[in-house]
Image: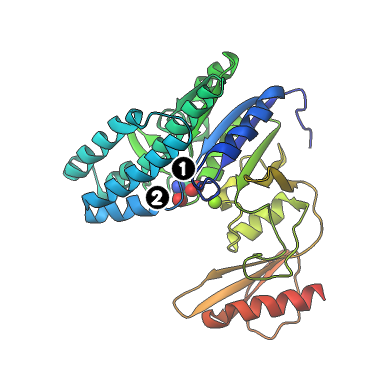
Amino acid sequence: MIYKLSNKRIVVKFGGSSIKDSFREALEFVLKLHEENEVVVVLSALRGVTDALLGLAESKDKSVIGKIARKHSILADESGVDCDILEPLFVELECVLKNERRFPNKGAFIDHVLSFGERLSVIIFANALENSGIRSEVVDALHVIKTDDNFGNAAVDFSGTAKRIKLIEKLLNEGKVPVVTGFLGGYKGLRTTLGRGGSDYTATILGSLLEARAVLIMSDVRGIYTADPRIVKDAKLLPFVSYEEALNASALGMRALHEKSICPVMGRLPVILGKTDSYRLGTFVSDISAEVPILTYKPVNENFACIGVVGLREVNFNAPIYKKGKNWISFLVKREELENSLNDLHEVIFK
Ligand code: ASP
Ligand code: MG
């Protein structure tokens, strides 16, 4: 792999769960990166907001709008940003909710409602950056990420998107930090979304089209572990994970990185995962593997889950094999036994 070290572009994505009540840490990190690099920020919605909007699209319950508004005005206050600038978006949201019948179908309506999560968070972030003395501009991915009309899980049209990347390049050339809405795209003027957790994908699409030197994925975990550290206490952080391992692990349920996000960067530029609140970079995803297995899990149905082991083809484990691939294997377990099984299997592999 040839890293474009001469290129000073970096794309950094912040996850909603790592923001909590303040953008302070994320802002400080961007200021630091900006000293030596051209920085593009990709932002998710704040924690819980996409779920709330999804409920709102169904219930049209106005009290939800009030809750979302409060959450953002607290963050705006904390960030020294006047929350009045968010008002037009809330007016638009109310108007969209009243006019569902004007959308070509339900999916198009839901995606428009979901778009407000990211559109609200980027306004606060870009304004907070300006307050810190960094010129910045909001970029609505509707105008950059071109997709098909598969609402809810739209496929990206890379050549169409490549033609629009100039919009971001222009801002970089002006010395500005573009703050881009993650997760969102556009199809003939309608709003689309890239699938839940899709902001990672936005970041790697942009990183690849901008020929960035790296994509940083900042969240509330330090990186990729040998197993989910919230369930397996002995889980170890992996300093290196190969593209292929990351791809297999996310397909088998690992949530640190969105499954689609590896494709645009594979063999081209590294993805580095880190933790927002300490700026600690934990895992480097590239051609290099640590050659350590990764355990994953995901539900199969109401009663069963599967545990995946990436990096091994055979494991002696007391559960039926569910599926097998070139360099991975998965087992079927009862959902209520998932925690124990994950811990047991981790012990078997890492004893
Ligand atoms: N806000 C979106 C979601 O909750 C996208 C993302 O967080 O990456 O799925
Ligand atoms: Mg995520």
Residue 296 on image: x %, y %:
63, 66
Asked if labels 2 and 1 touch by Cβ distance under 8 angstroms, the answer is yes
Q: Quadrant of residue 26?
A: top right
- Ligand 1 near label 1 (Cβ, under 8 Å)? yes
In this picture, residue 229 sits left or right of residue 306: right
Badge 1 is on which residue?
183
Q: Which numbered circle lies on residue 339?
A: none
Which quadrant of the structure image shows residue 318? bottom right
Secondary element at tag 1: loop
Instruction: Report the residue that reaches farthest toward the bottom.
Output: 318
Q: Nearer the viewer, residue 69 or 162?
A: 69
Identify the image quadrant of the C terminus: bottom right
Residue at the spot x=68%, y=42% of the render? 279
- Density class for disc 1 (Cα within 10 Å; few <14, some 14-19, many ≥20) is many
Where residue 254 sits: x, y (%)? 61, 60
Q: Is residue 80 left or right of residue 31?
A: left
